[in-house]
Image (spheres, coloured by chain):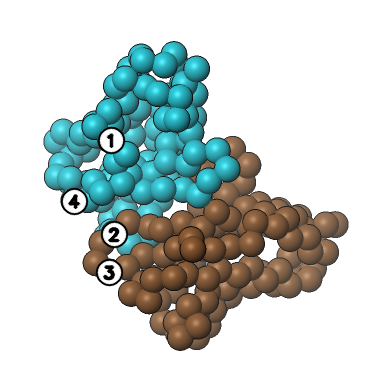
Chain colours: A cyan, B brown
Amino acid sequence: EAGVTQFPSHSVIEKGQTVTLRCDPISGHDNLYWYRRVMGKEIKFLLHFVKESKQDESGMPNNRFLAERTGGTYSTLKVQPAELEDSGVYFCASSPSGYEAFFGQGTRLTVV
Amino acid sequence: QKEVEQNSGPLSVPEGAIASLNCTYSDRGSQSFFWYRQYSGKSPELIMFIYSNGDKEDGRFTAQLNKASQYVSLLIRDSQPSDSATYLCAVKTDSNYQLIWGAGTKLIIKP
């Protein structure tokens, strides 16, 4: 069974540009999460989807971040325009029950 | 005060010994507690979770929870060099599904 897949694995963009990260959860997992780890800090929650609905987006830092999960399958996280402080590793996780979460490999975003 | 605290380490343990990793949390409403292992450059991997006071064993791993003291620990018996990684403690309240993370403890098992 395929795990959670994310792409790209790395992205380097200039400040002010737009980047879209993609996450494909484990098939059948209704719950999908986005987390972010900034260098030297702990992992922080961004948001939680149940199927296509945003259940909790309290961790989204500002309106430059937009997450979607059309059709309740894969999800995208768009950052527009990117700022230097957006650099970090973005993790996606999925869960069948909202309990155990299985993580993807992450996307390392560098904004220069 | 951080919501979930862990000693950053590194914690160095000789091969074959017991490694003890500790985590404290501030929210008394926390209900579920998770230990993840993360190798450098890789994704966090769930080792085990616990939600009742006491011990929970799974192979060489034992999670211990003391809600009164707001303390959760992970013991690794017969430590192996392959156990060398960063161990992340995460906490969840039942009011939402988000995980609150500690910064992780780096564990080094010396052959």
Which chain's residue wears label 2?
Answer: B
Task: Name the residue nearer the viewer: A39 or A99.
Answer: A39
Is A59 displayed left or right of B2 in the figure? left
The verdict on a common chain for dots 2 and 4 is: no
Which chain's residue wears label 4?
Answer: A
In the picture of the structure, the residue carrying the numbered disc 2 is B97
Q: Residues within 10 Å of mark 1 (few under 14, many from 20)?
A: few
Image coords of residue B9 (percent x, y) = 70, 57
In the picture of the structure, the residue carrying the numbered disc 4 is A55
The Cα atoms of the two marked residues, 4 and 3, are separated by: 14 Å
Image coords of residue A47 (percent x, y) = 28, 45
Is B28 displayed left or right of B39 in the figure? left
Q: Secondary structure at mark 4?
A: strand
Is A95 displayed left or right of A86 in the figure? left
For badge 1, the amino acid type reads: Asn
Determine the residue positioned at 37% across, 76% down: B28
In the picture of the structure, the residue carrying the numbered disc 1 is A62
The Cα atoms of the two marked residues, 1 and 4, are separated by: 17 Å
